[in-house]
Amino acid sequence: MSSTPIQAFPTIDGVYTVPIKAYVDARGQFMETFRREWFPWVNWEKIQHNRSDSKAGVLRGLHYHFWQIDYWYVSKGIIRVGMVDLRPSSPTYLQAATLEMGDSNNIGLFIPIGVAHGFLALTDCILTYVVNNYYNGGVDERGVLWNDPTLGIDWQITNEPIISERDQTNRLLKDIPADELPT
């Protein structure tokens, strides 16, 4: 396999997309969805691979990390990703963006530390993701309310989403103490 070039996401600094090429023949298809070498600046020593299955209408997030990078790939279905840069030192601080991934947009998505992220399942979907540090939710993962009006994420929601109890208790950005936000 040849190396796949990553592409800088235009709205949020440090976010990248990776075009995924499918090799199709009479038997089916093959896709290379992740390579450590695509992101040489990341230490992938403590790699963990996860899978999230969601029904259409489920909204997960917004979550952000202090020590963990995410790399997402949708292997089935379509999601709308919502992101906002929470890093005060970033040139794109507080900029928000959405992006559709999955069947109609076969890409990988690299999300750096300090960028809040979540997704709305537009169809039943399977999201797989690689992280560069083992999960430690009580220490590393935090949340901000998915529909905080100050974030300005355009989810394009027409029906009330299905949200976990945990994500329903996420706070507005203005109510999160500075020591619980990325630096």
Image (spheres, rainbow, N blue to C red):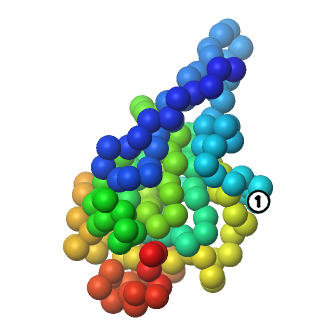
Q: Picture coordinates of residue 110 (x, y %)?
A: 52, 48
Give the number of callouts.
1
Q: Which is nearer the eye, 91 or 112? A: 91
Q: Which is nearer the eye, 41 or 82? A: 41
Residue 31 drawn above or below residue 134: above
Q: Which is nearer the eye, 176 or 126? A: 176
Mark 1: which secondary structure?
Answer: loop
Q: Assign the C terminus to one quadrant of the image.
A: bottom left
Name the residue rendered at 38%, 43% in the picture.
Answer: 9
Q: Is residue 51 visible?
A: no
Q: Picture coordinates of residue 66 (x, y %)?
A: 55, 72
Q: Picture coordinates of residue 54 (x, y %)?
A: 54, 56
Residue count near mark 1 (Cα–Cα under 10 Å), binned few <14, some 14–19, many ≥20: few
Q: Which residue is mark 1?
A: 46
- Residue type (three-letter) at the residue carrying disc 1: Lys
Q: Picture coordinates of residue 17 (x, y %)?
A: 46, 40
Q: Is residue 99 visible?
A: yes
Residue 24 drawn above or below residue 8: above
Q: Residue furthest top?
A: 26
Quarter holding residue 40 = top right
Name the residue rendered at 43%, 57% in the picture.
Answer: 119
Name the residue rendered at 36%, 63% in the picture.
Answer: 90
Residue 83 drawn above or below residue 104: below
Name the residue rendered at 44%, 80% in the picture.
Answer: 181
